[in-house]
Image (spheres, rainbow, N blue to C red):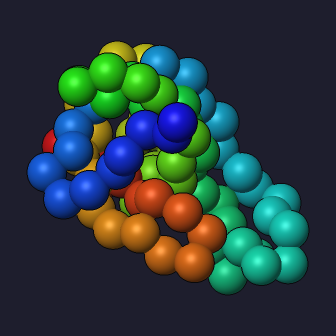
Amino acid sequence: MGTTVREGTTGKIVSFTVINVATPEFADQAPYGLAIIQISGGGRVLARIKDGTAETLSMDAPVIFDHNDDHGPVFRLS
């Protein structure tokens, strides 16, 4: 069973990378942050980080769910 991500979900970044050369479906978003997030209520999720760059992302940074789109959950730094 997967981790449920919905409005109000918070967590922290446990691992991340910044994608500079994206696949065609994400080309308009590059560069973008991609992180493994430890959800506060338990579980982990792989998600994009809104406005996530090498300068703004860090280990243990707090994040909050922003929205879902056709490609999955998107979080933002909180």
- Residue 77: % across, % down: 28, 45
Viewer can see residue 12: no
Q: Nearer the viewer, residue 74 or 39?
A: 39
Image quarter for residue 41?
top left
Residue drawn at (59%, 57%), measured in percent from left and top?
32
**Within the image, what quadrant is residue 71 found in?**
bottom right
Q: Does residue 1 sit above or below 20 in this rendering? A: above
Q: Is residue 78 visible?
A: yes
Judge left or right: residue 25 versus residue 14: right
Outermost residue, left direction?
8
Q: Residue furthest front?
A: 1
Location of residue 10 with respect to 58 vertically, above or below: below
- Percent from the top left, x then y, of residue 67? 33, 68
Residue at x 36% of width, y 46% of height = 4
Residue 51 in picture, x, y percent from top left: 42, 59
68 or 63, which lies in front? 68
- Give the tally of numbered discs: 0
Task: Compare residues 57 and 47 and report the one nearer the observer.
Answer: 47
Residue 5 place in picture, x, y as percent: 34, 50
